[in-house]
Amino acid sequence: MLAANWRTNMNWARILLGGLAAGLVMLVSQIVLHTVVLADQGRELVADWATRGLDASAALEPSIPLTGAIFLLGLVSVWVYAAIRPRFGPRAFKALQLQRFESRMS
């Protein structure tokens, strides 16, 4: 059974900082993925849109909410890890299992 004061046992400042750091890592990896790894496919997509008469700048409109969602996912990831760590221990295997679970959720 969970303790009644489980909220007070968690270090919320570290969870917030860790969540922001995790969100930043996720955001940078997304930027690298889309600007370096998938750059050629992106150019082909924009050219295809131009032939169809579509404006490529409209594709940037959801970037701010998606950036917020990435940071929210980072925060939730760190919070869930902080919640399960006392129960399952500080093993790297548990963190990898959590990462696999979260990658399925996103």
Image (tube, rainbow, N blue to C red):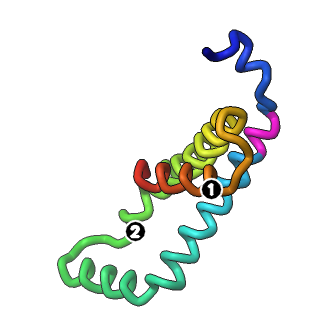
Q: Are marks 1 and 2 in contact (CB under 8 Å)?
A: no
Q: Which picture quadrant has residue 24? A: bottom right
* Residue 43 point in image, percent of width and height: 38, 86
Residue hosting label 1? 93
Q: Secondary structure at mark 2?
A: helix
Residue hosting label 2? 57
Q: Which mark is residue 66?
A: none
The vertical placement of 18 against 10, above or below, is below
Q: Amino acid at mark 1?
A: Phe
Estimate the spatial distance between the alpha carbons at disc 1 and disc 2, rounded to whole Å.
42 Å
> What segment is highlighted magenta in the picture?
13-17
Q: Amino acid at mark 2?
A: Ser
In terms of depth relative to the viewer, which is nearer, 84 or 102?
84
| Residue 22 inside the magenta-drawn segment | no
* Residue 41 point in image, percent of width and height: 36, 85
Identify which residue is drawn at 55% across, 49% down.
98
Q: Nearer the viewer, mark 1 or mark 2?
A: 1
| Residue neighbourhood size for the residue with mark 1, other residues' Cα within 10 Å, grouped as few (<14), some (14–19), many (≥20) | few
In terms of depth relative to the viewer, which is nearer, 44 or 69?
69
* Residue 32 point in image, percent of width and height: 57, 76
| Residue neighbourhood size for the residue with mark 2, other residues' Cα within 10 Å, grouped as few (<14), some (14–19), many (≥20) | few
Left or right position of 93 against 38: right
Q: Earlier in the sequence, mark 1 or mark 2?
A: 2
Q: Secondary structure at mark 1?
A: helix
Q: Main secondary structure of the magenta part?
A: helix
* Residue 71 point in image, percent of width and height: 60, 49
The vertical placement of 96 against 65, above or below, is below
